[in-house]
Image: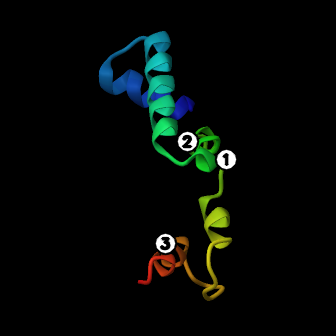
Amino acid sequence: MQELINTIKEKANLSEEDATKAAQAAVDFVKSKVPPFFADKIEELINGKFDLGAMMGGFGGGNAGESPLDKLGSMFGK
């Protein structure tokens, strides 16, 4: 989250406090737009603590070397 705060602070020329508020507002907005089962993972993803690949590995069959995007694609008949 600190990386997001720093980026907002730098690009928008905001104080640390205002950048923190903006980052939290952005995270809350994204959380409101994703399915509930994924919303609690948004901050982990932003902080680099959430392994999206591991989550995607649980979807569908597919080959062991298949990327998460390949697995997602196969779910939709690609």
Q: Is residue 34 left or right of residue 45?
A: left
SS for dot 2: helix
Earlier-in-chain disc, 2 versus 3: 2
Q: CA gap, disc 3 to disc 1?
A: 19 Å
The relative height of residue 55 versus residue 37 in the rendered view (above or below) is below
Q: Residue 67 — which label?
A: none
Q: Is residue 10 above or below residue 4?
A: above
Name the amino acid, label 1: Lys
Q: In the image shown, does 36 or 29 lie closer to the viewer?
A: 36
Image coords of residue 10 (percent x, y): 36, 24
- Callout 3: few (<14), some (14-19), or many (20+) C-alpha neighbours within 10 Å? few
Give neighbour class at mark 2: few <14, some 14-19, many 20+ (Cα, 10 Å). Answer: some
Type of amino acid at the residue the image marks with label 3: Leu
Quadrant location of residue 77?
bottom left
What residue is shown at x 62% (from left), y 88% (from top)? 63
**Image x and y of residue 61, in percent:** 64, 84
Which residue is at 49% across, 72% downward? 69
Disc number at residue 69? 3
Q: Nearer the viewer, mark 3 or mark 1?
A: 3
Measured from the top left, where is residue 14 in percent x and y? 37, 14
Does residue 73 lie above or below 32 as drawn?
Answer: below
Q: Whole-Å distance between the Cαs marked 1 and 2? A: 8 Å
Q: Which of disc 1 and disc 3 is earlier in sequence?
A: 1
What label does residue 46 carry, if any?
2
Q: Name the residue under label 1.
A: 49
Spot the residue most to the bottom: 63
- Mark 2: amino acid: Ile
Local crowd size for mark 1, using a 10 Å CA cut-off: few (<14), some (14–19), many (≥20): few
